[in-house]
Image: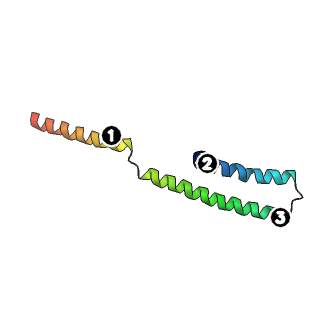
């Protein structure tokens, strides 16, 4: 369950945030004092979800890309080819 929430936390948050106005449409006589704690919880949950997504982005930025390895290999091959061409001429 924890892995599911970790992977889909923002989706769960957006679902809950979308349900609040729908539920208020079904029950329009609900006092604003009852809605205020729900709004506060949604704001807090949104902040937590944003920080979690930012942490995942930061972690992904520090991982090396397979394209980096390919670019390094391409540089090495180009240097070897240039060396061979210099020897041939």
Point 71% across, 63% down: residue: 40
Residue at numbered disc 3? 32
SS of the residue under disc 3: helix
Relative vertical location of residue 73 with respect to residue 18 in this rendering, above or below: above
Of the pair 62 and 86, the residue shown nearer to us: 62
Give whichever of discs 1 and 3 has the lower sequence position.
3
Point 28% across, 40% down: residue: 73
Q: Is residue 25 left or right of residue 8?
A: right
Residue at numbered disc 1? 70
Give whichever of discs 2 and 1 has the lower sequence position.
2
Q: Is residue 69 left or right of residue 23?
A: left
Disc on res. 18: none
Residue at numbered disc 2? 5
Instruction: Give the spatial CA distance, label 1 vs label 3.
Output: 58 Å
Give coordinates of residue 23: x percent, y percent: 82, 51
Instruction: Give the spatial CA distance, label 3 vs label 2.
Output: 29 Å
């Amino acid at each position: 369950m924890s892995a599911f929430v970790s992977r889909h936390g923002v989706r769960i948050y957006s679902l809950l945030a979308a349900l609040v106005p729908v539920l208020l449409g079904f029950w329009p006589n609900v006092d604003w004092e009852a809605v205020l704690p729900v709004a506060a919880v949604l704001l807090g949950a949104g902040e937590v979800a944003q920080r979690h997504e930012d942490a995942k982005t930061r972690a992904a930025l520090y991982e090396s890309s397979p394209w980096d390895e390919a670019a390094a290999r391409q540089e090495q091959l180009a240097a070897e080819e240039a060396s061979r061409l210099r020897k041939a001429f």
